[in-house]
Amino acid sequence: MRSVPMRETQTQVRVNSFIQGVYNWMALGLGLTGLVAFFVANSPTLLQLIFGNKLIFFGLIIAELGLVFTISSRVHKMEASTATKLFILYAALNGATLAVVFLAYTASSIASTFLICSATFGACSIYGMTTKKDLTSLGGFLFMGLIGIIIASVVNIFIGSSAVSMIISYIGVFVFIGLTAYDTQRLKNMAMTQPEGLDADVIRKGSILGALSLYLDFINMFLFMLYIFGGSRD
């Protein structure tokens, strides 16, 4: 009779350890992104290099997309150290392109929006970890919403409507709120179904992949919130 609670305890310890690793890597990625963005924003030379040359700017964007695709699709085929380096490189490159945030918005609005986003993200993650409701079906709906946001954003590049941008931002916040809860539950379920005695490198790669998912959820939620709540420098 005592073996069942013991197995449950071991599973919970394994899940908690895995989720903690995911959040540690996510926090490292966010911290690096913030530091690089702040550094670039305060360097006229780097600003001119990145934003004054469309070839370099779009090259960085393409490199970021390539890194996300590579990590997401090939993480299980690469070494854990390689996955870690690629994630860190992605976070740094993303920081370089997000330096424009420090130029477009006031420091106080960036800080307040970051706090709002952090609290919202934390609440969604807790819900995803603790809810008994299966959020699997929600994932497909949210993915369709994400595709809709991308299409609407591309169309709005040509329209240039601030009202449409605001609507997209509100929808984007809700989509990434849902994705945060969904991804958290997905990672929890993945950890629960992992066999015991997995190689540390396998666990590390799973943590990196999970960190990338939650990192993207946080960054996108923050950017949409910043458009809604942020105070412009103009």
Image (cartoon, rainbow, N blue to C red):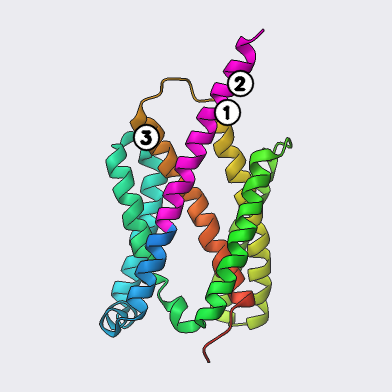
Highlighted range, magenta: 1-29
State the residue lying farthest toward the top. Answer: 1
Where is mark 3, residue-wise?
76
45 drawn magenta: no
Looking at the rendered image, the disc whose residue lies closer to the viewer, 2 or 3, is 2
Give residue 32's quadrant in the image.
bottom left
In the image: residue 224, left or right of residue 55: right
Image location of residue 4, percent across then percent down: 63, 13
Q: CA distance from mark 2 to mark 3?
A: 27 Å
Q: Earlier in the sequence, mark 1 or mark 3?
A: 1
Work out how far the residue at label 1 is from the one at label 3, CA to CA, in angstroms.
24 Å
Residue at which label 1 appears: 12
Please give left or right for residue 163 compared with residue 193 in the image.
right
Could you say which is closer to the camera, residue 17 or residue 128? 17
Q: Residue furthest bottom?
A: 234
> Can you give x and y, in whole percent of width and height, for residue 10 in the image?
54, 22
Q: Nearer the viewer, residue 16 or 196?
A: 16
Whichever of labels 2 and 3 marks the residue nearer the N terminus, that label is 2
Please indicate, yes or no, whether residue 210 appears anywhere in the rendered image: no
Circle 3 Cα neighbour tier, 10 Å, few/some/many (<14 / 14–19 / ≥20): some
* Residue density around tag 1, few if under 14, some if 14–19, many if 20 or more, within 10 Å: some
Disc 2 vs disc 3: Cβ atoms closer than 8 Å? no
**Which label number is shown at residue 120?**
none
Q: Nearer the viewer, mark 1 or mark 3?
A: 1
Q: Amino acid at mark 3?
A: His
- Per the rendering, the mark at residue 8 is 2
